[in-house]
Image (spheres, rainbow, N blue to C red):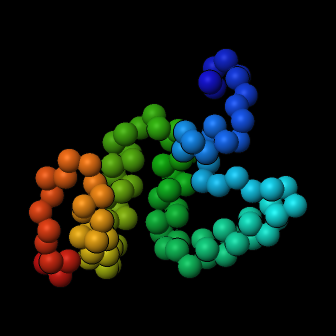
Amino acid sequence: MLYRGNLIEASQALEWGLVDEIVPYPELLAKAQEWASDLTVKSAFALQQVKKSLASRGEDFALEQKLFANCYRQKGIKQRVLAWLGQHLDELPDSRLERKNPEE
């Protein structure tokens, strides 16, 4: 799609997971402000790591692994990730993960 420059409909981009949401133009500014507000409560460090990962354009898997590991080492992240996994374990396909106490 990128090489050939093919255009797709917004609904197709949503179906393929290329976009998070389709927003009518009159609501676009309000939605952008809402998302920007959401980002202000996120970890600045994690957002910085995401920006670095995106800048690599997926060409440096080792860098992406390192950035993820950096995020995972941040205070409290391990417990929150394990807690989330515990809540969503049944939704993961063919999960072989064991339920563990997030405090471990």
Q: Nearer the viewer, residue 95 or 56?
A: 95
**Could you tell whether 21 is left or right of 26 in the image?**
left
Q: How many marks?
A: 0
Asked if residue 11 is positioned above or below residue 22 in the image, the reply reads above
Q: Nearer the viewer, residue 34 or 49?
A: 34
**Could you tell whether 44 is left or right of 74 in the image?**
right
Asked if residue 14 is positioned above or below residue 43 in the image, the reply reads above
Specify the quadrant of the image occupied by residue 69.
bottom left
Farthest top residue?
4
Q: Quadrant of the C terminus?
A: bottom left
The residue sitting at 35% across, 62% down in the picture is 70
Q: Is residue 78 visible?
A: no
Q: Position of residue 52 (x, y in %)?
A: 51, 52
Q: Position of residue 78 (x, y in %)?
A: 27, 72
The residue sitting at 28% across, 71% down in the picture is 87
Q: Position of residue 84 (x, y in %)?
A: 31, 71
The residue sitting at 80% across, 56% down in the picture is 24
